[in-house]
Every structure is written in C-alpha cells, then in structure tokens.
C-alpha cells in the first residue's frame, strides 16, 4: 500500500501512449512539428494551489517536451491585491461587490508593476483568469498573439466588475471559455477550451487493488455492498444534505452505503457549518461515511472513486465540475445535476444520468443499481468521452491548434 | 502488387471550437440562425459532431436534432433532421437549405410550439480546422491496409467524412484513391457505402479494413 502511495516521478509524453494510443500521440507530434522553437508565455497568479496552477504545472513541461519554447510566469502582488482579486472572482461568479472604488486602482497598480517586471515578448501569450488581465497594457503595436483564458463561470457576472474588466478583454485577440454558457456577446473571437484532467496524476492514475482495499478498510467501508459516493468540498452549493436525502430514499430499496468525502471544512467556517449539518442529517446511520480529508488526499480520493458503485455530483451550481470527469475516467456510472459544465460531461443516458432534484437523483440511483449492465455501459462510454475531450492531451491539442490557427491568420 | 502512380498521403486535422455571438432560445430563433450562421457553423453542428461523439451510436448525430429533442422536446422534428444523410451532400449550402426547410415547415404548421422557450440555449459554434500532413504516404493497397490499421480517429474522420466537402463529391478521399489511383472501383463503392451513422468511427474503420482484407485474400 505504501509503495503505491509514495510512487511519484516526472511524467513524459511517451507515458501517455498507453492511455490515448499511439495514433493520437502521432497526431499531436504532427501539430507540434510546426511549433518547434516558437515562443509561448503563460501567465497566472499562483504557482501552487488551485486548478489553474495544477493544469499549468502539467501542461508546460509537456509543451516543452514537444519542442515549444514555453515559459510560465506568475504575477506577484500584496495581500491588498489578492483581497481585491478574490472579491473580483466572487463578483464575476455573480456575488455582490462591496469594495471601494480604490480597489480598481490597486488592481491596475499591481498589473502595471508586473508589466514592468515581466518580459512580455513571446509570439503567443496566454493570460489566465482576471488577475493578470490588465497585462495587455504591455502589448506594443498589437505585437504577438494574446489570448485571455477565463477559467471561471462568467454566465452571470456582477456588472460593476465585468464592466471594468471587459475593455481589457476586448483588447485580446481571443478569449477562451470552459463552456458556451460562460461566453458573452463579444467582438473578439471566443473559443471553447474545456478544462482537463491528467490521467497520470495521483488523483486519476490506475491503482493497485490492494491499495483500494486498504483505503476502504481504513474507513471501515464494506467493499461487498454498493457504495454511492460524492466527492466534493463541504459546501452548500454541492448540496451534501440533498445527497443524504437521496440516499435515504434509495436505502429503502437497496442495502447500500454512502460516502461523502472532501475537504474545506478545516479552513472555511462556512464549510464547518455545512459539515455539521451533514452530520446531523446522517446521525444514527452507520452506512453513511463522512470523510473530511486533508488536501494531500489525492490517492485516497482516487481509491474511493474507483471503489464506488455509482458516483454522485448533486451540485446546485457548478463551475465545470471536473470531479465528474474524474469519475467517468474511472468508468464509473455518474448521476449528476444538470448545472454548469456538467451537461458537457454527462450526456444524458449515454455517458451518465442528469438529474434536477433529490427525488430524481434517488430514482436514477435506484435505476442504475437495478440495471448494472446499463450502468457499466454508461461508465464505459463516459470513459471514452473523457479520453476524447477532457484529458490533458486534448488540452495540449487545443492550445497547439490555437497557436497554429493564429499563425495562419497572421 | 498494383502500385499507384500518385501515392495516398495521409493527413490529419485538428479543430478549434469558436462560439459565435448567435444563439437560439426558441425554435424560431434556430430557424433564423440557420439562415444567418456561417458555413463553418453548419459544418460544426453536422459533420463535426460526428467526430466529437464518434464513440456514441445512440442519440442524434447532429447538434441541431439533438437540441430540438433535448432542448425543445420536439421528437418528430428532431428525427426528421437527424435522418438527413450527410453523405448525400456535396456542399453545405444544400445541407443548410434542407435543414432550414424542415424547421420552417414545422414553424408554419405549429407556430405556438415554435415560440416555446427551450430548456437550454443553442449556441451557434464554428469548427476551425487546422489540417496537417502526417508524413505518411502509401503506393499500394497492401501498404494502405497496414497504415489504416494504425490510423487515428482524427485522420480517419478527415479522409472519410469531411473529405466530401473538400471534394464536392458524394465520395471520400479513400474511395477516390481506390478508384482513380488503383483502379479498384468495387472497393471504392463498398467503402463509400459504410454507414457512418450507425457505426462508431472505430467500427467504420474496422469495416474498411475488412473490405480491404477481402480484396487482398488469404
């Protein structure tokens, strides 16, 4: 068990051949051939933590291995800057914005500071998320190709913050969004760039059966009875209480177990409250396992997903919801809410089941438990869907295609 | 072994999806959009959807039919659109006209249903194609068979499905080469009859491999 845990090494392009197949890698090499030596710069606001840093930490080395001259820069800023950008982030998700007008000045001042510090002379520049969006001020005479990669749900942005940010976005050559729902009526080209998962990361790579068994033993979960699992932070928008309610309906018909695993309760007061509520509604049922896991639990999460009979994602709102892709990649049947980016991943009745309520969730769980061969087929097709669209190899393909398209336009 | 004077050169294509500013929230808006959207958009929602969902054999093969079914709950119209066979179209204008015509007929017959708000919007999108040579060329059917056995879906789709638009013919790159390059007209016709709707791309490729193996003999 410990060997599986500790194994960690640099991943190379050849490692993906058994995952996506030699023909796919051959096609990627064909794309890369025209990009050898071309300069690309990625800029975001953090080097560790968060989904963007996680994606870039895998994407950048692979692009380098393809021969692309890629550089990853991280912008710097004080606490005041990150307080403002956190408020921006929430406001762009639709929350109220109550910061003073000076916060816009703070935002611009740090962008200007970084503009002066960073060399911004690459042929292709990809600016990730709102924090460094005003670095576009550093572009001279429309040189190079600049795109803005928006990783957040912009479907209902706070108008105050969006109206401040939009003029900067309009100066880019294009904007990249994770879902059509997040796009806006803009005069610049908008491209669909799904987020991706890395099949070779600790969260997704194959595990030895002994390790999976060990994780179940550690948490006293019975491997012989059906396991329903939701992996998510203890956050109201993930509706863990609704998941327990759905499970209680299913439990009338099937002797199953429920695993609610995630984090966020330790450092988030709201998360702590939600965890308490979940414990309250689950009280007295020994088949409900509430696991508040530390952030370094990727392998445990992986094992729990692999051990599950069905994976649930009953969110009330969602950005993209990559935990769904993680479950699909593990060939698990998924029952998930039709919100955010989930319908992109779950094609109803083909790669999973979409639901809209507690009752609907319970019904589809019962249906899949009663029809294991159908459930298995959903998992298989879901796996293929992720292989085609949502792996890091697809992200590499999209970026390289974008760069080649930009070259052809130039 | 018959050698073609002109080799078959394998290529592949990669696509970007561009989301246009046009969207539909009702069937009547889809009709309007079908008239105004670009050819690249018609291509994306028909030919390209076959590639994006190549591993699925259920459901509708084009995005318009899928949205009319899932977003508007209009099964009959969805079936009519889905029954249009892309192999019959040598250009996008004809396909666009037929799609519009079916939707227009429905809107005229059922104006109230055509005005009902859909469950979700339809986003007109475009496929931006970047095609590249794979650096592989073959001169004989034997060599072709060997390469086809290892060919990726993207390249297969490029030569077997989207080539119809490039050629402006009711044929595909493979059949054209079998016929004009190797003089194998029967194989060309058989290959062109492979059903890309009821098969996955992989299954279609396997069928083509089988047809060639029959020609090659034991």
Image: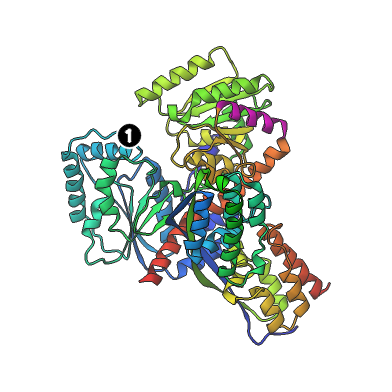
Point out residue A131 in the picture as x, y percentages from the top left corner: 28, 46
Answer yes or no: is residue A19 visible. no
Left or right of A130, for residue B97: right
Magenta residues span A358-371
Q: Is residue A43 left or right of residue A21?
A: left
> Where does the image place residue A149, in percent across and percent down from the top left?
36, 52
Color scheme of the displayed model: rainbow
User: Which quadrant does the N terminus of chain B fall into?
Assistant: bottom right
In percent of width and height, residue A95 lies at 32, 34
Q: Which of A332 and A189 is in front in this view?
A: A189
Residue at x 61% of width, y 27% of height: A362
The one nearer the camera, A296 or B59, is B59
Q: Does the segment drawn in magenta span residue A370?
A: yes
Q: Is residue B38 above or below residue A315?
A: below
| Residue in the foreground of this view, choosing between A227 and B179 | B179
Specify whether residue A203 is painted magenta.
Answer: no
- Which residue is under mark 1? A95
């Amino acid at each position: 068990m410990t060997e599986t845990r500790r194994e960690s090494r640099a991943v190379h392009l050849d490692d993906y051949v058994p995952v996506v197949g030699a023909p796919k890698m051959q096609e990627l090499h064909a794309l890369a051939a025209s990009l050898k030596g071309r300069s690309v710069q990625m800029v975001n606001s953090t080097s560790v933590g968060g989904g963007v840093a996680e994606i870039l930490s895998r994407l950048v080395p692979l692009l380098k291995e393809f021969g692309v001259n890629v550089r990853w820069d991280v912008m710097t800023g004080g606490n005041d800057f990150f307080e403002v950008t956190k408020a921006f982030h929430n406001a762009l998700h639709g929350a109220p914005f109550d910061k003073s007008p000076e916060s816009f000045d703070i935002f611009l001042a740090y962008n200007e500071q970084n503009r002066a510090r960073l060399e911004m002379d690459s042929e292709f520049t990809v600016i990730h998320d709102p924090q460094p969006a005003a670095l576009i001020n550093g572009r001279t005479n429309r040189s190079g190709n600049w795109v803005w990669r928006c990783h957040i749900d912009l479907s209902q942005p706070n108008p105050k913050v969006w109206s401040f940010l939009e003029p900067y976005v309009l100066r880019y050559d294009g904007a990249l969004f994770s879902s059509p729902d997040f796009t806006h009526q803009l005069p610049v080209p908008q491209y669909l760039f799904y987020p991706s998962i890395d099949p070779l990361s600790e969260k997704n790579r194959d595990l030895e059966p002994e390790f999976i068994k060990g994780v179940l033993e550690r948490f006293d979960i019975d491997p012989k009875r059906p396991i329903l699992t939701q992996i998510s932070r203890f956050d109201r928008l993930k509706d863990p209480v609704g998941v327990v309610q759905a499970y209680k309906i299913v439990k009338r018909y099937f002797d199953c177990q429920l695993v609610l695993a995630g984090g966020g309760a330790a450092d988030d007061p709201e998360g702590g409250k939600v965890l308490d509520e979940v414990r309250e509604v689950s009280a007295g049922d020994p088949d409900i396992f509430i696991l508040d896991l530390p952030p370094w639990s990727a392998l445990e999460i992986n094992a729990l997903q692999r051990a599950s009979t069905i994976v649930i994602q009953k969110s009330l709102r969602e950005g993209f919801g990559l935990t769904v892709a993680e479950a699909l990649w593990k060939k698990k049947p998924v029952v998930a809410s039709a919100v955010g980016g989930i319908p992109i991943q779950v094609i109803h009745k083909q790669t999973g089941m979409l639901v809209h309520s507690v009752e609907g969730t319970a019904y589809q769980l019962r249906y899949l438990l009663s029809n294991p061969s159908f459930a298995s087929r959903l998992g298989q097709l879901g796996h293929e869907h992720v292989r085609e669209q949502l792996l890091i190899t697809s992200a590499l393909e999209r970026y390289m295609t974008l760069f080649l398209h930009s070259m052809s336009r130039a | 072994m018959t050698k073609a004077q002109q080799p078959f050169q394998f290529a592949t294509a990669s696509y970007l999806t561009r989301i246009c500013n046009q969207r539909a929230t009702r069937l009547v808006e889809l009709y309007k959009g079908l008239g105004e959207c670009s050819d690249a958009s018609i291509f994306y929602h028909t030919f390209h959807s076959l590639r994006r969902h190549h591993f699925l054999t259920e459901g509708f093969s084009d995005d318009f039919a899928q949205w009319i079914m899932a977003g508007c709950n209009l099964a009959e119209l969805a079936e009519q659109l889905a029954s249009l066979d892309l192999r019959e179209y040598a250009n996008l204008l004809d396909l666009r006209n037929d799609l519009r015509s079916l939707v227009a007929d429905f809107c005229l017959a059922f104006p109230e249903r055509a005005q009902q708000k859909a469950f979700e919007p339809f986003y007109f999108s475009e496929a931006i194609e970047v095609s590249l040579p794979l650096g592989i060329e073959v001169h004989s059917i034997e060599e072709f068979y060997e390469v086809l056995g290892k060919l990726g879906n993207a390249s297969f789709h490029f030569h077997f499905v989207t080539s119809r638009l490039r050629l402006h013919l009711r044929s595909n790159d493979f059949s054209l080469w079998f016929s004009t390059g190797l003089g194998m007209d029967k194989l060309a016709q058989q290959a062109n009859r492979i059903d890309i709707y009821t098969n996955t791309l992989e299954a279609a490729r396997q069928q083509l491999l089988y047809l060639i193996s029959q020609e090659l003999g034991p």
